[in-house]
Every structure is written in structure tokens, then in C-alpha cells.
Amino acid sequence: MTLMTWTAAQFATKITETDGEHQQIFNMVNDLHGSVGGDRSAIGAKLDALIGFVAKHFKTEEDLMKSHGYPEFASHKAAHDALVTTCLDLQKKFKAGEAEITADTTKFVKDWLYGHIPSIDKNYGPFLNAKGVS
């Protein structure tokens, strides 16, 4: 079941690397969403892979912003850090058997991405494009 659909009109930053990573994140969230209610070990593996990939993606974005002097770097990183903290807490609770991954969990991720990419990530695109990053 598809929870999220990436479209260039809604989500493209015009930075090839980050757009590709965003698409991969959407695919991973959709895969996790499709496994809700299924095998717990498979869900755990998908959750771990998603969190690992998101951390890699955030580093990619942050390295680009930092190396090119993006003026909104600090607030952008703070948004990333807040999500990472939430996800790591959920992952810890899931592994301890204190939480489950539900449709509400994947909807939270969807809502965060649907709010973050169009209104925050898309802002670094023109700045980085002007610096020669595409």
C-alpha cells in the first residue's frame, strides 16, 4: 500500500543527490507502512534501515549546506536533530518491546516529510544551485 508519493512539483529541491535520497526515503516509508501488522523482526529490520538511511541523508544535506555557507543551516539542522531524537527513541522502545510500529507511526513520518521537504528543504535548492550544486 502506497502511503507517500514523491513528485517533482511538490518535492524537488533541484539537487540531484538529495532528490534521489528523498525518493528512496519515500520508498522505504512505503515499504515499512506496508509491513505494519506483519512480522515484527521484518518491521524492525525495515525501521533500522530507514533510520540509518535518513541519518545518511541528513548528513548529505548538512554537509552541502555547511560547505556552501547556507544561512539557514542551524535551524535546518535543529529540525533534523529533533526528528532523529524522536526516531531513535522509538527504535529503542520498539527493540525493548515497549512500542510498536503502527499506521500512526508511518503517518507521523509522512506528515513530517510532507511538511519539511516542500517548506524547508526546497529553500536550499536555489541557494545551492547558485553555488553551482545541481
Image: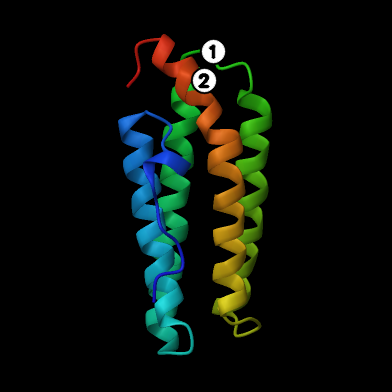
User: Percent x, y for residue 36?
Assistant: 47, 83
Tell me the quarter of the image containing the N terminus: bottom left
User: Percent x, y for residue 37?
Assistant: 48, 89
Secondary structure, mark 1, is loop
Q: Residue under circle 1?
A: 69
Instruction: Using a 10 Å C-alpha cutoff, classify the residue at mark 1 as few (fewer than 14 neighbours), some (14 to 19) or many (20 or more).
Output: few
Q: Are marks 1 and 2 in contact (CB under 8 Å)?
A: yes
Foreground pick, 15 / 88: 15
Residue at image position (31%, 32%) is 16
User: Percent x, y for residue 98?
Assistant: 66, 83
Whether 99 is drawn above or below 62: the answer is below
Secondary structure, mark 2, is helix
Whether 95 is drawn above or below 40: the answer is above
Residue at image position (45%, 74%) is 33
Residue at image position (40%, 84%) is 41
Marker disc for residue 99: none
Whether 64 is drawn above or below 120: the answer is above
Whether 26 is drawn above or below 76: the answer is below
Quarter assignment of residue 107: bottom right
- Regarding residue 91, the answer to whether it shows in the image is no
Q: Amino acid at mark 1?
A: Gly
Instruction: Using a 10 Å C-alpha cutoff, classify the residue at mark 2 as few (fewer than 14 neighbours), some (14 to 19) or many (20 or more).
Output: some
Foreground pick, 127 / 86: 127
In this view, the residue farthest toward the bottom is 38
Q: Amino acid at mark 2?
A: Lys
Query: Tell me, what colour scheme is on the image?
Result: rainbow
User: Percent x, y for residue 30?
Assistant: 40, 68
In this view, the residue farthest toward the top is 131
- Regarding residue 39, the answer to whether it shows in the image is yes
Marker disc for residue 66: 2
Tell me the quarter of the image containing the C terminus: top left
